[in-house]
Image: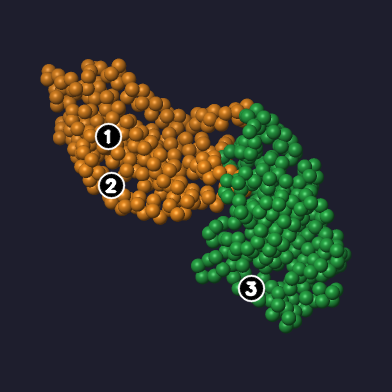
Chain colours: A green, B orange
Amino acid sequence: MGEQLLAINDLEVRYVLRSSTVEAVNGITLHVDKGESVGLVGETGAGKTTTALSIMGLVPNPPGKVTKGEILFNGEDLLKKDDKAMRGIRGANISMIFQDPMTSLNPLMTVGDQIKEVIQLHNDFNHEQALQRTKEMLELVGIPGDRYNEYPHQFSGGMKQRVLIAIALACNPKLLIADEPTSALDVTIQAQILELIGQLQEKFGMSLLLITHDLGVVAETCKRVMVMYAGSIVESGPVRTVYDNMLHPYTIGLFGSLPNLDVDTDRLEPIKGMMPDPTNLPTGCAFCDRCPNATDRCVKERPVLTEVEPGHLVACFHVSDKEG
Amino acid sequence: MAKQRKEYGKSQWLMVWYKLCENKFALISLAIVVLMILMAIFAPLIAPYPYDEQNYDAVMVDPSLEHPFGTDQFGRDILSRIIYGSRYTIFIGFGCMIASGIVGVTLGILAAYYPKLDNPIMRFLDVFGSIPDMPLLMCLILIMGLNLRNLLIALAIYYTPGYARITRSKVLSLRNEEYVEASIALGASDRHILIRHILPNAMAPIIVRFTLSTGGSILEAAALSFIGLGIQAPAPEWGLMISQGKQFLSSYWYMAIIPGVAIIILTYALNYMGDGLRDALDPRLNH
């Protein structure tokens, strides 16, 4: 195991509304090593984006609040840093790619200016150096440098996502958080963008936290995967191990609901039921309402992540009891 | 076109200029506004007579070569008074636009971007917005005293809430745009985001408001002069000239109509110029 770049310990995020409290993230613990790529998978509302935003210190407050835990980046707790220190870290050390490339660029600024902006925010470059660097970044993501002066509306969706990647990487961040970077793109462009992210990650030796609901994307890009459900991590481990030997019923359900090319079926098998109301989570296992193997213990007690084989952790009584 | 754009791309302002040139109405309007401004600056050089020179040999003469727009009841040349009057009109129009624009836009941005300031600022401005325009202006002027500076201040106060409200509503929607969020995530400061991302994107409605309120403030000033609370005689303000001319409307119509036409031309030109400017500043309309 390499050196830990990012370590989140027992993070808890709450959105306090007038009449209720949304328990968005419930004591998750995860780490990303230097140069490693980790996938964070889960359905809509599982708390993936909230986790990412709390790393950046961008949980909207109010109503959001980090109530517990610590986020260690290079050994320093990000939650204790003030606004100014965080501004220095955002973009320079931790960068983020957002979901929708169509709206993530300022329509009134040329793409070149938008890349240059970040470079000048975090470096003492003069105009010429910044321009040089901007053109390098554009070439790096596969856009001719002389399109510097064009506006976002002159680019296609995939090209805009490339520009966003260039912006995110312009200051050589150590950690890149990609929040569903390919959700808004069509499948052929998805593959290109993922490949590009993978290449650049290797080239710069940065770490990647890829947030997605697409298990295929994770398999393609990441070495390790974490499955999130209702604000908790239910299963984590190396991609190969988890995909070959999935143990948590939710993970099994997720894979079950994917189309399989080898088997000829008319209907896919969805996970029955709905995600529990995040303002009113059950005391026991959050998945117990939908779980085919739920017992009384699942309703009363919340399972914790337990290592069942090297590097493979699962939060389920049935699995840990059987293995242990 | 693509190649051309790349060449011009070096200066975004040059691009704006080229686009403005494609819009004939806007260009003509711009020319009229510029001419009016030049006329105001060089009034003493252009005007054939001093604006207050009374010539009792030529009282209320009809337009002629000697007096192209005729003379008024004191024998003053109306053309010269129109030329000198543009000084007041343009000073009031642009002064009010700049003062209320800067104050209003700043307040609007602060109210929208910092939720804690929203209620204090907007409710305070609502007080001014809730009084009809003429009573408000009359009260302000009577409280502060009758002179040009106070007229300008009163008009600026009257136009500020409109700017603040329009800016606030635009910024509120822009604040949730993903590129603003992305910019925060890249480590930009509030000030940087407000100036580089939010203000330029909020500019379109503000520019329209600029031109509308410039025309509006000229009309308001004329109206105030008309009822005697604006510029005082013998100054050649256009509204005042209409007011003085109205008693001779049946026999010497040009005394009131000519300054009226001058006001209309300037107001129209400002509005068309604003429209064209807004379109030219939006790179998405780049065709």
First in residue order: circle 2 vs circle 1 = 2
* Residue count near mark 1 (Cα–Cα under 10 Å), binned few <14, some 14–19, many ≥20: few
Give the amino acid at mark 1. Arg
Dot 3: element: loop
- Any mark on residue A269, and which? none
Q: What subunit carries mark 3?
A: A
Q: Nearer the viewer, residue B132 or A10?
A: A10
Relative image position of residue A265 (x, y in whole percent): 82, 69
Q: Are marks 3 and 1 on the same chain?
A: no
Q: Chain letter of disc 1?
A: B
In space, the residues marked 3 and 1 are separated at their CA atoms by 65 Å
Q: From the image, tell me which residue sits under label 2.
A: B133
Q: Which mark is residue B149?
A: 1
Residue ID for mark 3: A281
Q: Residue at x 12, y 20 (%)?
A: B56
Q: Are marks 3 and 1 in contact (CB under 8 Å)?
A: no
Quarter holding the N terminus of chain B? top right
Residue at image point 67% right, 72% down: A274
Other-residue count near label 2 (Cα within 10 Å), few / some / many at <14 / 14–19 / ≥20: some
- Amino acid type shown at disc 3: Leu
Residue B168 visible here? no
**Label 2 – label 1 distance at C-alpha:** 18 Å
